[in-house]
Amino acid sequence: MGGNYISQTLLWTLIGLCYPYLGSAQEAPISDAVKKEIPGIVKIYQELHANPELSFQEYRTAAFLAKELRALKFEVREKIGRTGVVGVLKNGDGPKVLVRTDMDALPVLENTGLAFASKMVAKNEKGQDTGVMHACGHDVHMTAWLGIARIFSANRTNWKGTLILIAQPAEEIGLGAKAMLEDGLYKDFPKPDFALALHCDAFRPTGTIGVCEGVACANVDSVDIVVKGRGGHGASPHNAVDPIVLAARIILDLQTLVSREINPLDPAVVTVGSIQGGTKHNIIPAEVRLQITVRSMKDSVRKHLLEGIARIARTAAEGARAPAPTVLVRQEEFTPMLSNNVPLTQRLRKVWESKLGREFVSAREPVMGGEDFSRYAQGGVPVCMFFLGTVPKEKWAKQQGMSLPSLHSEFFYPAMPTTVETGVEAMRLAVLELMQP
Ligand SMILES: [Zn+2]
Ligand SMILES: [Zn+2]
């Protein structure tokens, strides 16, 4: 280790002496065009972070982004897919490139201790007050997106074509991309030749990016089950049918779906995320409600899981002489898996490796999370989402892995300004590559 360290140090000293303009290899080189924008957009990042809005409630955020794009001479339309914004900047003949940001935050009470932490409160879908926080980094995505808008609007000599910037609502509930597409995104505006996006990664050091060729995120389904019984006195279970015991049985039986029925080489997840039933110690309730998230990366696996859940619930009820349960697959909440177009991703990866440096670009394993950016592949549009490291360097060195706060955590925050700097630079390189004159 020691020898290795010394020889590496020697090597970098030599490189530093020979090529002083390469700068330190501690950080990827950031262009002047990006550096110039950083102080301004980091301030905007803090504003966005302090003022988060929930899915489909992004009114102030959308109005702000629309105003910014208008000032940069984009043609702007608002309220596309409820609160979405579309900005188009034409610059002669050439490819049409779409860059997407999402805008929504999460019903999470922030606990980062940042000076600009959110103190916002909003009504959740049940009408209850909840803290609101940009815990998924969508504030970083918007900031990088604005950086791209500023840079490409200011300098139009080094690119040609049509830049389409979209700010999408409601990514967190999987409905925003669908809403924008159904509202004419690919009909009333130029249909893109390529669609790009970035997403924060809570387990990657700041200053680096992760690239995933092919499948990057999973199919996401939501299933609701109402387990039915017959209510009664807790002291005379023989006169009732207990849906709590039945729900417990169903939950355990569901664990065999992935472990015993799906090919171990096919990724799949069935998680019961919510169970609700009963009011008091001595009352057997009439029903119990389960909420289940189902993840897959193949249509055949998806079909098997959804049918299996219904089968297991039904047969368990039958075995307990209970009424048939209702099983509802919430079609409207389905998010298809995200598959990054391979030739496009390879092309961009080459650019990133040569311009940012190989040490700052690495492969990223697919995850079972969902991302409705997948929907922009509609009609054969090649899509690529890359992943932006956010973990402060000192923190990364100390506690790699599981002890870091994940996305959606009340403790999550990205290192600044390196995270935004790297995000804008990587996106700038990608857009330039696709829009060369
Ligand atoms: Zn999220
Ligand atoms: Zn997100």
Image (cartoon, helix red, strand yellow):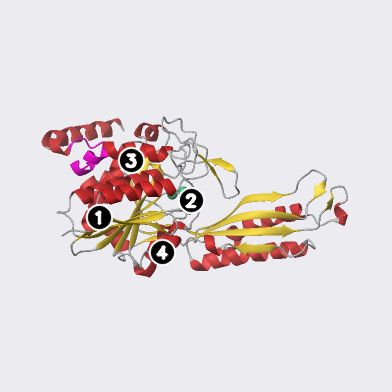
> Does the closest atom of ligand 2 sit within 8 Å of the Cβ of label 1?
no
**Which residue is label 4 attached to?**
181
189 or 312: nearer the viewer? 189
**Figure check: 257 above or below 355:** below
**Which residue is label 1 attached to?**
431
Dot 1 or dot 2: first in sequence order is 2
**Which residue is label 2 attached to?**
55
Query: In 3D space, how far apart are the residues under numbered discs 3 and 2 (Cα atoms)?
Result: 24 Å
Picture residue at 22% right of the left edge, 32% below the top: 9
Q: Residue furthest left?
A: 18
Query: Is residue 207 visible in this depiction of the protein?
Result: no
Residue type beneath disc 4:
Leu
Query: In 3D space, how far apart are the residues under numbered discs 1 and 3 (Cα atoms)?
Result: 18 Å
Label 2 crowd (10 A; few <14 / some 14-19 / many >=20): many
Q: How many marks?
A: 4
**Residue 362 locus on image (x, y percent):** 32, 48
**Figure check: 420 above or below 293:** above
**Which residue is label 3 attached to?**
419
